[in-house]
Amino acid sequence: MGADETATHILLQCRGVAEQSAAYLDSPASVPEALGDLGGLLSFW
């Protein structure tokens, strides 16, 4: 991670990407799935 890439920054950035993807794909189910996957990825913190 770079100096400006804190866990919070990455979490917020990933959430923003998930929300934009859901809006683009018009699939609301993808947001909870993406956030669930994100929790698994960040479980090592």
Image: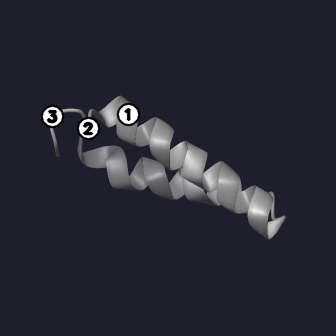
Where residue 21 sits, quadrant-wise, is bottom right
Neighbourhood count class around disc 3 (C-alpha, 10 Å): few under 14, some 14–19, many 20 upward: few
2 vs 9, left or right, is: left
Crowd band around label 1 with a 10 angstrom C-alpha radius: few (<14), some (14–19), many (20+): few
Q: Closest to the observer: 43 or 21?
A: 21
Residue 29 in view, yes or no: no
Residue 16: x %, y % from top left: 58, 44
Residue 2 visible in the snapshot: yes
Element assignment for label 3: loop
Q: Are marks 2 and 1 in contact (CB under 8 Å)?
A: yes
At numbered mark 2, what does the secondary structure look like: helix, strand or loop?
loop
Q: Which residue position holds label 1? A: 9
Q: Position of residue 30 (x, y in %)?
A: 70, 62
Q: Is residue 15 left or right of residue 39?
A: right
The residue located at (38%, 34%) in the rendering is: 9
Query: Could you tell me which residue is drawn at 73 percent across and 59 percent down?
Result: 22
**Residue pictured at 24% horizontal, 47% vertical:** 44
Report if the CB atoms under discs 2 and 3 are less than 8 Å apart: yes
Disc 2 to disc 3, how far (Cα)?
A: 6 Å
SS for tag 1?
helix
The residue where tag 2 is placed is 5
Q: Which mark is residue 3?
A: 3
Label 1 – label 3 distance at C-alpha:
11 Å
Q: Identify which amino acid the numbered label 3 is placed on.
A: Ala
x then y, percent, for residue 12? 48, 36
| Amino acid type for the residue under numbered disc 1 | His
Q: Which quadrant is the C terminus positioned in? A: top left
Q: Position of residue 26 (x, y in %)?
A: 84, 64
Q: Residue furthest bottom?
A: 25
Q: Residue furthest right?
A: 26
